[in-house]
Image (cartoon, helix red, strand yellow):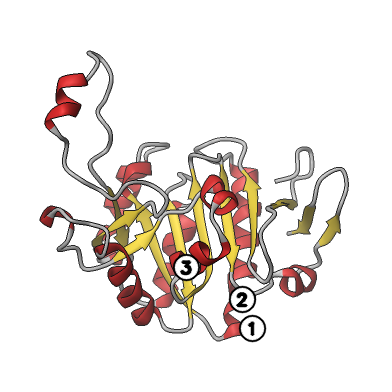
Amino acid sequence: MIPGVADCVRLNGMPLQPPLQAFLVPISAFPVPDPELATLTTFLRTLTAAAAREWDLSSEVFVQLEQLKVGGARALFSEHAPEWIPEVGLGVWPDRDPPAIWTREEFKNAVPGERLRPLMYQVFRVGTSPASRERAREIMLGCGPVLQIMAVDCDRFFRETSALFLSRIKHRSYRSFPFYVPLLEKKTLETAKPDQLEAWFCSATVYIRQSFEDKAIVIASREPLTPILEELGGRFEKKPEPVWRIPC
């Protein structure tokens, strides 16, 4: 959102090596205020529809379990779970240590009152039809747990992510999930080398994730998004910082 402009979305550019492009869409708060949510919903609906047409993409939508903690998100998810038939998988941060059980040293060095590191980052894959996936994204968007992958062949994407992450995950407790997805944030995208990003994307074309870490929506693409942003009526401003302003 652009402060003071209720019908525009601001995309802050990230300095990545072409053709890869990535942007942050700032969010004022979680849960997302209603006027801002309406604009974000319209923007993501039109962006993903345009990308699907341009590159013949299918979508997978996920709900991030660890982010189901704002604005009644758990109750909302539980209400719709019978419709969405969620399947539990594992989200993996490719630039962090792979998931592992707590060690004896971690227990020994634990500070009273401080939480130990998370054991894992689970995600729910929304099943059923493409229309249900889009509906799930729009329902959960206000609470902030949404992750969306767009690819030409989603089955291939899951095969590649399983091979990628299982090569690093050693403990058997984390090796039996039906699917694995990368968790990307601003820091990940800006500090990784181009060949690392290429590997982490696997065969995904567009990656969209609501990031509590960045208080933003991360949008990344291995294909140039500029023509689509222009198609949506976007205006690019180079100074004082690179930004796209998209009317909705």
Please identify, in this view, whether the residue under mark 3 or under mark 2 is nearer the observer: 3
Residue 244, percent across and down? Answer: 78, 56
Q: Secondary structure at mark 1?
A: helix
**Residue under pointer 3:** 201
Q: Separation of disc 3 and disc 2 at Cα?
A: 16 Å
Residue found farthest to the bottom: 56
22, above or below 32, in the image: below
CB under 8 Å between discs 1 and 2: yes
User: Considering depth in this image, is 134 or 216 the residue closer to the camera?
Assistant: 216
Residue 28, percent across and down? Answer: 62, 36
Q: Residue at x 62, y 52 (%)?
A: 38
Q: What is the number of the mark on residue 54?
A: 1
Say what amino acid the circle numbered 2 marks: Ala
User: Considering depth in this image, is 142 or 162 the residue closer to the camera?
Assistant: 162
| N-terminal-most mark, 3 or 2 | 2
**Residue under pointer 2:** 51
247, above or below 198, in the image: above
Is disc 1 surrounded by few (<14), some (14 to 19) or many (20+) residues within 10 Å?
Answer: few
Residue 220 occupies which quadrant of the picture?
bottom right
Say what amino acid the circle numbered 1 marks: Glu
Determine if residue 86 is in view. Answer: no
Q: Residue at x 52, y 66 (%)?
A: 195
Residue 124 occupies which quadrant of the picture?
bottom left
